[in-house]
Image (cartoon, grey):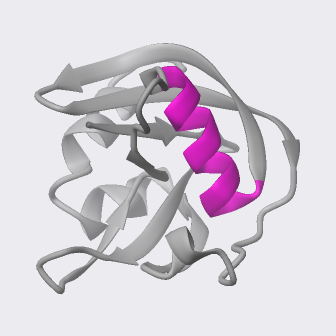
Amino acid sequence: MIAEGVVIQDNKILMVRQKVSRGAIVWNFPGGQIDPNETPEEACVRELKEETGYDVFVTKLIRQCVGKFTFGVTIVSGSLHLDKTRPENTDIIEVKWINLDDAKKIDRITRPVIDEIIGGLSL
């Protein structure tokens, strides 16, 4: 199971560009595997810290589908950085704030959630 977080600030969305198992490079929301004995919310908070450097607070569940939880989150503290020395970050190429309108164009997988957000879903 996977937990990911959607962070929006100043009309920009925080995304990671990463290599996926099929060898492609895609843009995704920060997130990853839920560890044993970890709630989806705890996994979301941990993964965002590992991948972006931000401490976050989960504000709401945006969507849940088979094996995947997508949460709206708010940054509590920290600064944007990617620690490439962490083994779990070796597939992450970059972490970037992307304009919401541009984000709709970069990856078809994340587009439905971005469309919901732009359509008035508040985080």
> Residue 51 sits in which quadrant?
bottom right
Residue 111 on the magenta segment: no
Q: Quadrant of the C terminus?
A: top right
| Residue 37: % across, % down | 46, 24
Question: In percent of the image, x 49 and y 53: which residue is there?
Answer: 30
Q: Quadrant of the N terminus?
A: top left
Q: Is residue 53 visible?
A: yes
Q: Is residue 121 visible?
A: no
Direction front: furthest residue = 36
Q: Main secondary structure of the magenta part?
A: helix
Residue 43 on the magenta segment: yes
Question: In percent of the image, x 29 and y 69: which residue is there?
Answer: 106
Frontmost residue, 104 versus 4? 4
Question: In percent of the image, x 35 and y 68: which residue is there?
Answer: 27
Query: Is 66 situated above or below 121?
Result: below
Query: Is 71 situated above or below 13?
Result: above
| Residue 17: % across, % down | 42, 74
Query: Is 2 situated above or below 15?
Result: above
Query: Is 21 situated above or below 53?
Result: below
| Residue 109: % across, % down | 17, 54
| Residue 58: % across, % down | 60, 21
| Relative horizontal placement of residue 91, taking residue 108 as reference (left or right) | right
| Relative horizontal placement of residue 109, taking residue 9 as reference (left or right) | left
Magenta-tinted stretch: 41-53
Frontmost residue, 102 versus 95? 95
Question: In percent of the image, x 65 and y 82: which residue is there?
Answer: 84
Q: How many marks?
A: 0
